[in-house]
Image (cartoon, helix red, strand yellow):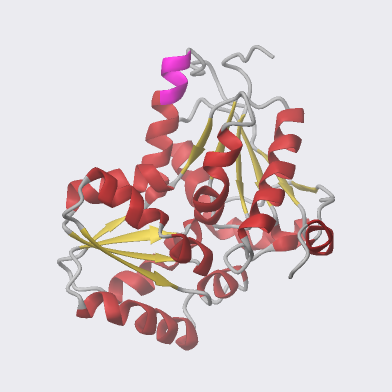
Amino acid sequence: MIKNSLQRIGLFDSGVGGLTVLREMYRQMPTESLLYFADSARLPYGTRSPEEILLFVREILDWMCNQDVKMIVMACNTSSALALETVRKEYELPILGVILPGAKAAVKQGKRIGVIATSATAKSHAYRQAIQEINPQTLVWEIACPEFVRLIEQNQLYSNYTRQMAQQYLAPLIQEQIDTLIYGCTHYRHLEKTIQALLPASVQVIDPAEHIVAAADKELSLLGLRNHQFSLPTRFYVSGSPQQFAGLSQQWLGYYPQVKQVQTQKSTSEIMALNPLD
């Protein structure tokens, strides 16, 4: 189907993490109309297998294509790391992931780069591969932070436990004297005050959300799909509780969003039936 500039851009994440990308869309591309989906019924993604993530992503992309979006932004590092290359070959519309834009920005900043990410993203070494393809001399350390997404989704942004976890996760990177830190999960920007208070002042922080939006803007311009008129109100959808998502996201959006629920079909039990363990 031929796309036009007035169609929406679709963004998705496992929860509220992708709102960091959404806010950048508001800032950098204010005339674009957006659709946001949070797969909150199945979060966190960071502890799931590549097979599960790919199945979830395909289901979300199918649904977004039915919503007639002109572009899809994976506002989720785990999905970008484990599914992006596969689904780009399967769908005709442009699909962007956060890892390459974040890696490019980090390489411009430093030579000793730390990445904090979900367990799945860290295990994939997607950031290390992307960074070292650009500059093989760059040193990269990837640290899994399995507690962060849960704490953010529970709105425990400033608890003592959250600070203790941040201190624990950042300690090996500080010991390696990193000069640059990448938020390797879109959720982590929500912990910015806690994280930056623990980092040496010399460490530059890279938020891939800023850079994926710049890449999306460039891609739409190249395709002639940039909207220069006006934006429609953002549509919000979740697979979990609309009330819980709306209440949590209000602090970052600055307004209480109207959220609708979408019933997801693919469950972990179905995946296990398709991919039985040996």
Work out which residue is located at the far front of the displayed protein and give it.
278
- Magenta-colored segment: predominant secondary structure: helix
Residue sitting nearer the eye, 130 or 201: 130
From this viewpoint, is residue 246 visible? Answer: no
Q: Is 1 placed left or right of 74 in the picture?
A: right
- Image-based side of 225 in relation to 189, left or right: right
Q: In this view, does 101 lie to the left or right of 133?
A: right
Tell whether position 210 is magenta.
no
Q: What number of labels is visible? A: 0
Image x and y of residue 151, in percent: 56, 75
Relative to 90, does residue 56 appear above or below in the rendering?
below
Residue 227: % across, % down? 51, 18
In the picture shown, does residue 118 fall above or below 107? Answer: below
Quadrant for the N terminus in the image = top right
Is 251 or 200 nearer to us in this picture? 200
Q: Quadrant of residue 43?
A: bottom right
Is 118 above or below relative to 98?
below
Which x, y percent locates residue 125?
A: 40, 60
Q: What stretch is highlighted in magenta?
A: 219-223
Can the viewer see residue 119?
A: yes
Which quadrant holds the C terminus? bottom right
Name which residue lies at 27% across and 74% down: 173
* Residue shown at 50% from the left, 61% from the top: 187
**Residue drawn at x 57%, y 47% as measured from the top left:** 83
Residue 171 position, x and y percent, is 29, 82
